[in-house]
Amino acid sequence: MVAPHIFWRRLARLTVLVAAPALLLTACSVLLPAAPAAPTTATSLPNGVAAGDVTQTSAVLWARSTVTGPMTFVTSSSDEMPAQTATTTALDPSLPVTVTVENLTPGTEYTYRVTTAGGESAGGVFRTPHAADGHYGLRFGASGDWRGSLLPFVAARNVPARELDFFVAMGDSVYADRPSPAVPLVQAATLDEFRRKHAEVYSEAAEMNTLADLRASTALFATIDDHEVTNDFAGGAPAAADGRFVEESGLINQTALYTNGLATFFAFNPLRAERYGVMGGDGRMDGAPKLYRYRLFGLDAALFILDARSFRDLPLARPDRNDPADVARFRAETFRPERTMLGHAQMADLQRDLLDAQARGVTWKFIGIPEPIQHRGLMSAQDRFEGYAAERAALLRFIDEEGISNVVFVSADIHGTQVNNITYSLGPDAPQIALPVFEVTTGPLAYSSTLGPIIIADGRDKGYVSEEEAATYAALPVANDRDNVPDDRDDFAKGIVDRELVATGYDPLGLDGAPVDAHLLEGDYVALHTYGWTEFDINAATQVLTVTTYGVAPYVESDLESAPADVWARQPQVVSRFRVTPQ
């Protein structure tokens, strides 16, 4: 890694002494060798180390060793408490291991070090959430959508220096259905293929391993979107309804492809392997992997992580936007009350926990959902919450009628940042009801194409962007400015989206005029032409939320071949920043 990281210096507190060939571990304080200026990945720990799924008193620690045999995890705080030591065994060099450390102290920073059977070690840092007894401030990050063929992920290189409390991987953390150097196939299928896909994105390239550095610098939460299995899959649908799954009976979330994809996702993330029990109904959630999480971080924030893929019904037929009758058909079908994206048990969990957070007096409620819930019009609406409008309306009506305050949705999937307030209606022809709720979409960390070119290409294909408009867009520069003048690609593409939204009766992009006390500070409420991630920072004293998106110029595989040094040198810059005062 090129730049030094603040967090690495903290690892010198850890109570470990490594001696070759023997490994000596004690619970008393001993000195480490001098820490290097920047983290390095041990050769037998090629994907680094990670901590995640933190509670106020526990954390899951993770590592993958290419050397089989015993592995030791040592965890220490800076408060003179004895270190905790846990040992497990690496049985397969392709399969990571985890340990869960308990009896931790809320609101405490911990360092940890993982040592392999061969004596190599690597370390990391995490913080436990504060108890829900006061305001302490909070800073976390989120992104999604990265491909192994675009290593190294330079857009993530500044994450460790931001000293986050946690980071949320919002889905599409691998593209199992796209070729990459590790698996040059159109679809990963076996456990070995899925494991190579995941190992690839946490591997070094050009002497950088930015995702491993990110994961070593903070606690991780994670969920899936579709590409952890295959594009646009609907886990609650019959397997026989989708020809990509070979099974002729059962549901998609019971198939070998889904099972292998989810097992590998859990294996490569520091997560508890939770499952649903027998939930009844049509059985779609019985015994299924459970990604839903609810965590409190003081009284500053609550975090809710959703799985929007594993239990959803089949998407509706894509509407022909040039046929008013077919558009009306689509809108009516989205309000069929039996259709679900989340599954009834997950929806009930979310509603219960929102009520709990509100009753406790928690200021901000962040709901992480892989696909956007904001209105985006007809473009790919069948794959988003707009295609499951009855359930969407039920959730938003619940938030509205129960008085759940300061709700922020955080999503990814669309390969760009769009910020908008949230409205809902109770039927296809009913008026929109505005809420003091907004959404931030984030990413992609590294996936081509970004959202701006996607908007223009889809518009040309569907007939709502003319050839003249496409040519005008192509001639414009990229400039993340605060005005709405269509003299740069972001503003031009935003204007296309706004035209579609307003024509449909929805609010235009951004928070100007929304029932949210927001102030734009830098850039715009969109960032459609960069790779990057988004930071959410709550001030302890005022509870004001500042949302900052960092970005780098996008690149493709050919850029890595023709001008690699140019890509490697890119540094994340602020492309959007705004603040919101809570209700």
Image (tube, rainbow, N blue to C red):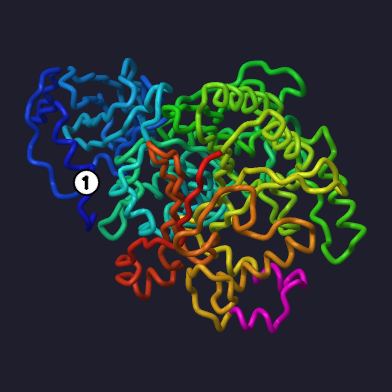
Residue under label 1, please give it.
6
User: Where is residue 172 shown, x and y percent of the image?
Assistant: 53, 48
Q: Is residue 463 magenta?
A: yes
Placement of 376 over or under 285, stated as above or below: below
User: Where is residue 426 shown, x and y percent of the image?
Assistant: 82, 40
Please state, as top left, top right, bottom left or bottom right, where the N terminus lies in the image: bottom left
Q: Residue at x 74, y 64 (%)?
A: 500
Under circle 1, the secondary element is: helix
Name the residue type under label 1: Ile
Residue 358 relative to residue 133: left or right: right
Can residue 238 be seen at all in this image of the molecule? no
Q: Is residue 140 magenta?
A: no
User: Where is residue 291 shown, x and y percent of the image?
Assistant: 55, 30
Residue 142 relative to residue 571: left or right: right
Can residue 345 be seen at all in this image of the molecule? yes
**The quadrant where residue 66 appears:** top left
Mark 1 crowd level (few <14, some 14–19, many ≥20, 10 Å Cα) = some
Q: Nearer the viewer, residue 346 or 204?
A: 346
Q: Nearer the viewer, residue 428 or 347?
A: 428
Q: Residue at x 51, y 48 (%)?
A: 580
Residue at the right extreme of this rendering: 325
Q: Residue at x 52, y 25 (%)?
A: 361
User: Where is residue 288 shown, x and y percent of the image?
Assistant: 61, 25
Instruction: Name the chief secondary structure element in magenta.
Output: helix
Placement of 304 over or under 232, stated as above or below: above
Placement of 481 over or under 65, stated as above or below: below
Please provide the residue range marked out in magenta: 456-473
Please state, as top left, top right, bottom left or bottom right, where the C terminus lies in the image: top right
Q: Nearer the viewer, residue 111 or 258?
A: 111
